Image (spheres, rainbow, N blue to C red):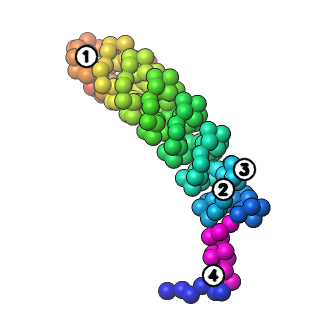
Amino acid sequence: MSILSRDKWEKLTHKKNLSGAEALEAVNKDGYDLQYVKDQTPEICLAAVNDNGFALKYVKDQTPEICLSAVNDYSDAIKFVKYQTPEICLAAVRQDGETLKYVRNQAPKICLAAVSEDGDALEYVIDQTPEICLAAVKQNGYALQYVKEQTPEICLAAVNECGDALQYVEERFLDDEIIVVNGKKYRLMEEV
């Protein structure tokens, strides 16, 4: 067990009650110091999330501006947003489609943006539509594995994007004929 020097101990205990200019200076250096700020102002909170979007989890009174800034810095900060607006959710999924898993109200526009950024985000789409599934497999053919209701159009788009996606095509859409995709010939699951 290490013993803290008096100087280090004073710095740690002093941080517990930051306010005013001292608080602003602290969060500009390290956004996480927001957790020690007694009287949070919008200016202090904004500075904290601009330094580190993850500091949003310490913001007591979240505003859309503060939340959007946090998400723009670090898309996963969406999980700490208390009141998710479509604008905030879109900002998050446009940076990283897989942050869709933290979006509470999955509007089709948000889901489409998420799978357009990362087809694998389809795994987190609650209400899949053919349009959303098609966009996902066009971005990443392997996303076919997450499609709940495959159609010939979706399967073909997936396999055209990535021939190996053929392994996820439901058997009912395959037959004994040879399928040619991107110059390669396939029969069922094997390359010819």
Question: The disc labelled 4 sits on which kind of residue?
Answer: Trp
Please identify the dominant SS of the magenta region: helix
Depth check, front residue: 60 or 140: 60
Answer few, some or many: residues within 10 Å of disc 1's Cα (few below 14, many 20 plus, some between 14 and 19). Answer: some
Between discs 3 and 1, the one toward the N terminus: 3
Look at 37% across and 13% down and name the residue there.
Answer: 153
Query: Callout 2: 10 Å neighbours few (<14), some, many (20+)?
Result: many
Circles 4 and 1: CB distance less than 8 Å?
Answer: no
Q: Nearer the viewer, residue 145 or 43?
A: 43
- The quadrant in which the C terminus is found is top left
Mark 1 touches mark 2? (CB < 8 Å): no
Q: Which residue is the extreme one toward the front?
A: 39
Whether label 4 touches label 2, CB < 8 Å: no
Using the image, determine if residue 92 lies above or below residue 24.
Answer: above
- Amino acid found under the numbered disc labelled 1: Leu
Image quadrant of residue 151?
top left
Circle 4 residue = 9
How much space separates mark 4 and mark 2, taking CA atoms? 24 Å
Q: Residue 79: give x, y in percent of width and height.
A: 49, 45
The alpha-carbon separation of the residues under discs 4 and 1 comes to: 69 Å
Q: Amino acid at mark 3?
A: Glu
The amino acid type, in three-letter code, at marker 2 is Gln
In the image, taking residue 140 as reference, residue 5 lies left or right, namely right
Whichever of callouts 1 and 2 sits on the residue coming sooner in the sequence is 2
User: What segment is highlighted magenta in the picture?
Assistant: 7-18
Q: Is residue 45 above or below residue 121?
A: below
